[in-house]
Amino acid sequence: MFNEAIIIPVIMAVIEILKGLGLPKRFGALAALLLGMVIGVFYLDYPQMKIRIFRGVIYGLSAAGLYSGTKNTIEEVRTRRG
């Protein structure tokens, strides 16, 4: 099993790649959620499927929230400086 700490940055990176390939920005959070669920089902090593899906949902939503929070913070800093 791999270290689960890398899942959130991996989801963020994949979503950025998908956006670069034409995924509309408004679907980024949904794509992160779905990707997190897929990762949970196929790559997490928990005995029950519902735990895998739940952890995947948590990772997907965390990736979407981390991206959104970082983007909003950067925009706020730029607004205050300029």
Image (cartoon, rainbow, N blue to C red):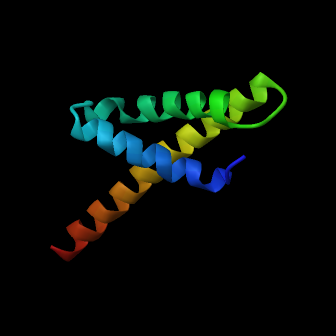
Residue 57 sits in quarter: top right
| Residue 3 in view here | yes
Kindly indicate the quadrant of the structure image that contains residue 30.
top left
Residue drawn where x is 43% and y is 47% of the image: 12
Residue 47 pos. (x, y %): 84, 30
Foreground pick, 63 / 75: 63
Residue sitting at the far top: 49
Residue 63: x and y in percent read: 50, 46
Would you place residue 29 above or below residue 4 in this image?
Answer: above
| Residue 7 shown left or right of residue 70 in the figure | right
* Left or right of 15, for residue 50: right
Residue 19 drawn at (x, y percent): 27, 38
Q: Residue at x 40, y 48 (%)?
A: 13
Q: Residue at x 76, y 24 (%)?
A: 50
> Split into 4 quadrants, where in the image is the C terminus?
bottom left
Q: State the residue at coordinates (77%, 30%).
A: 51
The percent position of residue 69, horizontal first and vertical second, equals 43, 54
Determine if residue 65 is in view.
no
Name the residue nearer the viewer: 55 or 71: 55
Q: Can you say whether 12 is above or below 70 in the image? A: above
Residue pushed farthest right?
47
- How many numbered dots are placed on residues in this image? 0
Residue placed furthest toward the front: 1
Q: Residue furthest left?
A: 82
